[in-house]
Amino acid sequence: MDALKKRITDDMKAAMKGGEKARLGVIRMILAAIKQVEVDERIELSDERIILVLDKMLKQRRESIKQFRDANRNDLAEIEEAEVLVIQDFLPQPLSDAEIDGMVADAIAEVGATSVKDMGGVMALLKPQMQGRADMANVSARIKACFIA
């Protein structure tokens, strides 16, 4: 068992013992999502693939939060925000704005990008480095800003 999956399982046991029902529910949801991919693809997920699953879950929560806020359902948005915090516990340390800007600038230089048309190459270079550590929609907006400014 990979280290990340073991850590998630250990946290589930700790949440059970500690009576943390909300955290336990989110951790079970995470393990179910991991198990679903493992069953569908008939493989055991590596830490990198688990991070992709967690990143997808985070993106779904962020979209839900926005929709709930737009619909004035702050009660549901708060539940999603609590889930985001638990999911983020298992992801690598997020990148700072300065780190993201530096990596974007380096990638643009490395690819030799000169316009928005070259954005795909820049994103392809950055995605593996930033997966689980930055909101890729935010990164995409920062790349566009470099060409528009």
Image (spheres, grey):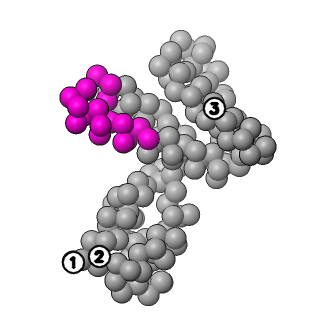
| Residue kind at label 1, given as amino acid type | Ala
Q: Are marks 2 and 1 in contact (CB under 8 Å)?
A: yes
Residue 80: quadrant of the picture: top left
- The magenta span reads 60-77
| Residue kind at label 2, given as amino acid type | Cys
Question: Mark 1 = which residue?
Answer: 149
Please, what secondary structure does the residue beneath circle 1 have?
loop
Bin the neighbour count of mark 1 within 10 Å (Cα to Cα): few under 14, some 14-19, many 20 and up.
Answer: few
Q: Position of residue 107 (x, y in %)?
A: 45, 77
Disc on the earlier residue, 2 or 3 = 3
Bin the neighbour count of mark 3 within 10 Å (Cα to Cα): few under 14, some 14-19, many 20 and up.
Answer: some
Image mark for residue 31: 3
Q: Please tell me whether residue 51 is drawn above or below residue 121 in the rendered image.
A: above
Q: Residue at x 32, y 25 (%)?
A: 76
Q: Position of residue 41 (x, y in %)?
A: 74, 46
Q: CA distance from mark 2 to mark 3?
A: 39 Å
Residue 116: quadrant of the picture: bottom left
